[in-house]
Amino acid sequence: MPLIEVRDLKTYFYTEDGVVRAVDGVDFTIEPEKTLGVVGESGCGKTVAALSVMGLIQIPPGKIETGEILYHRDGKVTELTGLNPKGREYRSIRGNEIAMIFQEPMTSLNPVYTIGNQIMEAIILHQHLKKKEARKKAIEMLHAVGIPVPEQRVDEYPHQLSGGMRQRAMIAMALSCNPSLLIADEPTTALDVTIEAQVLDLMNGLRENFNTAIQFITHDLGVIAQMADDVVIMYLGKIVESATVSEIFHNTKHPYTQGLMNSIPSLATTKKERLIPIKGVVPDPFEIPEGCGFEPRCPQAMEICKTKIPPLKEVASGHLAACWLYE
Amino acid sequence: MSSDNILLDVKNLKKYFPVRKGVLRRVVAHVKAVDDVDMYIKEGETLGLVGESGCGKTTTGRTILRLIEPTAGEVRFRSKKLAGQGEEYKEVDVATASRKTLKALRRDMQIIFQDPYSSLNPRMTVGAIVGEPLLVHRVAKGKERENRVRELLGAVGLKPDHMKRYPHEFSGGQRQRIGVARALALDPQLIIADEPVSALDVSIQAQVLNMLEDLQEEFGLTYLFIAHDLSVVKHISDRVAVMYLGKIVELCKTEELFTNPKHPYTEALMSAVPVPDPDYNVERILLEGDVPSPVNPPSGCYFHPRCRYAKDTCKTEAPVYRNLGNEHFVCCHFADSLSLRPVQTG
């Protein structure tokens, strides 16, 4: 039984300049205790898809147009888009059963409260612990994420911590209520590689200890290879390819995914080869192509691609791609 | 050291920023952003400068150009444009050059900045931005200047009619191209590229990297390529310098660095980079803790608190930056005896 099933999700934003179809008909599932990697470039809708699950879309200008987000727990199914995002039930899920960490830990922590206070807030709210117990739990969590001298750090303010430590504090906060799903939105993008390695290692360890499923959003295919079990590739608000991590890397189907793979230099190649970039740029959100969104940049584009949107269909066992090449 | 084609020779370069405190703004300490850096760049090559945030790589780049006044050291540059009659070049110390010489030198040394959003004036048209160096240095004006701008925009893959547009009308990758065109305007010998692709999406990053390689070939450019992304540095550089807390800890040919690293920090840095291959299952070397503060660096070798090979000597004695032969420079007491792990290639 999956943990989260997202079906035909459409999240649009109604701006003064027109409608931005940030997420435009997306289906994916997250299995319990597994990591789903969501890959895409800026503006592809990967963050908006995650915020839709969290019920954090600002309405207006945003609106969940259609679609279902089914959340399975204890044999019950809750349809998240049907809940009032500000209502009691959503609030009891958000931060408790589904938690999120963000890219820039400095801007997502409150600078005027100690990190201990911020972690305790979630614990007191969701787990109904007394202040003293909550503090104990906060120290325990800081210890679990590898912050040295947690008894002392718990009373420090975010500015007193380094970037890596702040991200650890964020993770401690997110995991403090033992969520069944942790959404991590580019959690290591702002960190240096040696710190990134520490945080990724930590997240892998915590996943085992806390039995948490992770939705890992990133643009870095290296991080995906290391973290994810399953991967979805997004482009212009749609999923263009979806498969297990080894299928995605070894049996790449969609021209966009192939393009991404060819355009990154890798440490593990011996020869100095010329990179093969994807031509052109991501189209303007107000001028989305009529057919396949990737058609103007695709080296293998055909006539049909200009007019008809390819459906996401199975091209190999458990491997989906949205491309007319595989019709 | 083969000395014939060395374009830029940096010796003992230092930049200390004072830390002031109290009512009297007394100097209580120094941030040693660049601490005794030695390196040279040969004509036509790309030297990659890699390190984590705060290691001083950007300050090094800017101090070389003297956009930041150095505290001490020499930056010897062989300028072609300053060469007199019959001379191939003139060697100038950028660190002590007069204002007038410095201005002339700017025609030979240019910079590309990291953030293509903040390094272009939003109120100037692209034509004005790219053409400004030509005006400042009185190289071309009027129709001639316009033609040169067209040519430059063509060289970086933009259209001539982009001249009349403003920076906000362009995407990140295109803006970076505008920055490159501006740097090329005066036909420089050396370009310092300070994280030119780190603000760009991967598909665009590859376009800009390829363009930089093409331009290097076309115009015979020499690059100092500053980046934090080891994969990018490996791809573009002929030689690589690894920086840690204001010092270069290792510098050698790219191939050599990745197959035969000699400094434990290089080893850890290479091991930390996520490799885009799910079957890549090499155990990572995780560094403990964070980069120490450059105001109060550790005693002895700056890297010793995080180094898994550290011995007692490392705590007390600072290692000397030395040449192991074959242009392999390293700053570690035990560079000869350690056997470090190279990058595993798959």
Image (tube, grey):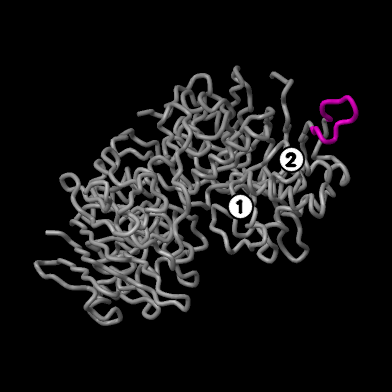
**What secondary structure is the stretch in magenta mostly built from?**
loop
Residue A83 highlighted magenta (yes or no): no
Q: Chain of mark 1?
A: B
The residue indicated by pointer 2 is B187
Does residue A95 appear in the picture of this structure? no
Q: Callout 2, which amino acid? A: Asp
- The disc at residue B257 is none
Q: Callout 1, which amino acid? A: Lys
Q: Chain of mark 2?
A: B
- Check the image and report above or below for B318 versus B125: above
Residue B87 highlighted magenta (yes or no): yes
Query: Residue B219, image x and y in percent?
Result: 68, 35
* Magenta-highlighted residues: B79-90
Along the line of sight, the residue nearer the viewer: B29 or B157: B157
Q: What residue appears at the point 70 percent right and 63 percent down from the top-left corner?
A: B124
A238 lies left or right of B208? left
Query: Residue B222, image x and y in percent?
Result: 67, 34
Query: Residue B157, image x and y in percent?
Result: 58, 47
- The disc at residue B159 is 1
Residue at the left extreme? Answer: A75
